[in-house]
């Protein structure tokens, strides 16, 4: 069974631009979560989707948004990029949030 | 607000030693506790999942315990190997479909 895939793996953007990251969950998983990882803050929860519905959102500004499609694939978008948005963005999928979370390899975003 | 703390932040041990990593959480109303491993520049690999109704889980040389009443979990690694070198993260699942992570323990196993 294929694992969680994330594209692209690396991105370099400049301040003010916007970016879209993609996540394909494990087949059959309907819950997809996104996390931001930085050296200073560690892993922080962004949002969780289940069957195309956002069920929870972390404490991030409105520039961070996401969606989930009917095939459970998910995208997150960050608009008006800031230097502080440089991070590893991780996606995780599971059958249910109470089950094991399987993480993808992440997208490394660098904002210059 | 759930807070998860991991002690120590870094640990260096000789190969073959048994070791314990600690994780504490402030809100005992969790539905599970998960341990992950992260290699440099990589994503997270799930090691063990303990549901709130369980006390421990084992997988090979790894054993994780959970004490909700005291807000603590431990990860025991037996007969450590250089390949165990990585950062170990614990995460508490508590309501609202999210995991709260600790900052991790960076483990180095010296050959």
Image (cartoon, coloured by chain):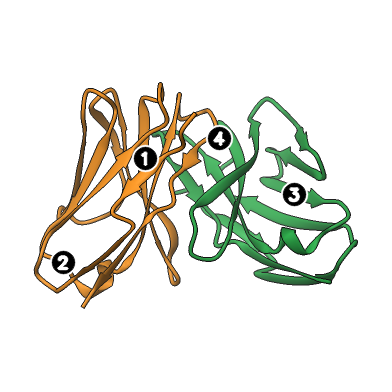
Front position in the image: B79 or B83: B83
Labels 3, 2: one chain:
no
The colour of chain A is orange
* Mark 3 surroundings within 10 Å by alpha-carbon count, few (fewer than 14), some (14 through 19), many (20 or more): many
Q: Secondary structure at mark 3?
A: strand
According to the picture, the residue beneath numbered tag 1 turns out to be: A33
- In three-dimensional space, the C-alpha distance between marks 4 and 1, rounded to whole angstroms, equals 20 Å
Q: Chain of mark 1?
A: A
Identify the residue at image location x=76%, y=34%: B56
* Mark 4 surroundings within 10 Å by alpha-carbon count, few (fewer than 14), some (14 through 19), many (20 or more): some
Q: Is residue B65 left or right of residue B33?
A: right
Q: Quadrant of the C terminus of chain B?
A: bottom right
- In three-dimensional space, the C-alpha distance between marks 2 and 1, rounded to whole angstroms, equals 21 Å
Q: Residue B78's x, y, as percent?
A: 86, 51
Labels 2, 1: one chain:
yes
Q: Chain of mark 4?
A: B
According to the picture, the residue beneath numbered tag 2 turns out to be: A81
Image marks 4 and 1: residues in contact by CB distance under 8 Å = no
- In three-dimensional space, the C-alpha distance between marks 2 and 4, rounded to whole angstroms, equals 36 Å
According to the picture, the residue beneath numbered tag 4 turns out to be: B29
Q: Is residue A9 above or below residue A83?
A: above
* Mark 2 surroundings within 10 Å by alpha-carbon count, few (fewer than 14), some (14 through 19), many (20 or more): many
Identify the residue at image location x=75%, y=34%: B57
- In three-dimensional space, the C-alpha distance between marks 3 and 1, rounded to whole angstroms, equals 24 Å
Q: Is residue B3 left or right of residue B75?
A: left
Image marks 2 and 1: residues in contact by CB distance under 8 Å = no
According to the picture, the residue beneath numbered tag 3 turns out to be: B75
């Amino acid at each position: 069974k294929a694992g969680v895939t994330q594209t692209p793996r690396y991105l370099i953007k400049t301040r003010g631009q916007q970016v879209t990251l993609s996540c394909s969950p494990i087949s059959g998983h309907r819950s997809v979560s996104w996390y931001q990882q930085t050296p200073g803050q560690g892993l922080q929860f962004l949002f969780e989707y289940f069957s195309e519905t956002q069920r929870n959102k972390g404490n991030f500004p409105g520039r961070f948004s996401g969606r989930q499609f009917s095939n459970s694939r998910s995208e997150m978008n960050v608009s008006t990029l800031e230097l502080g948005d440089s991070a590893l963005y991780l996606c995780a999928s599971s059958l249910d949030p109470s089950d094991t979370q399987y993480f993808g390899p992440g997208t490394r975003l660098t904002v210059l | 607000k759930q807070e998860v703390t991991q002690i120590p932040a870094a640990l260096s041990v000789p190969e073959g030693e048994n070791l314990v990593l600690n994780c504490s959480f402030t809100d005992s109303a969790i539905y599970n506790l998960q341990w992950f491993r992260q290699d440099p520049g990589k994503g997270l690999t799930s090691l063990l999942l303990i549901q709130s109704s369980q006390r421990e889980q084992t997988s090979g040389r790894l054993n994780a315990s959970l004490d909700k009443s005291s807000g603590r979990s431990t990860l025991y690694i037996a007969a450590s190997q250089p390949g165990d070198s990585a950062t170990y993260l614990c995460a508490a699942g508590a309501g609202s479909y999210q995991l709260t992570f600790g900052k991790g323990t960076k483990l180095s196993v010296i050959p």
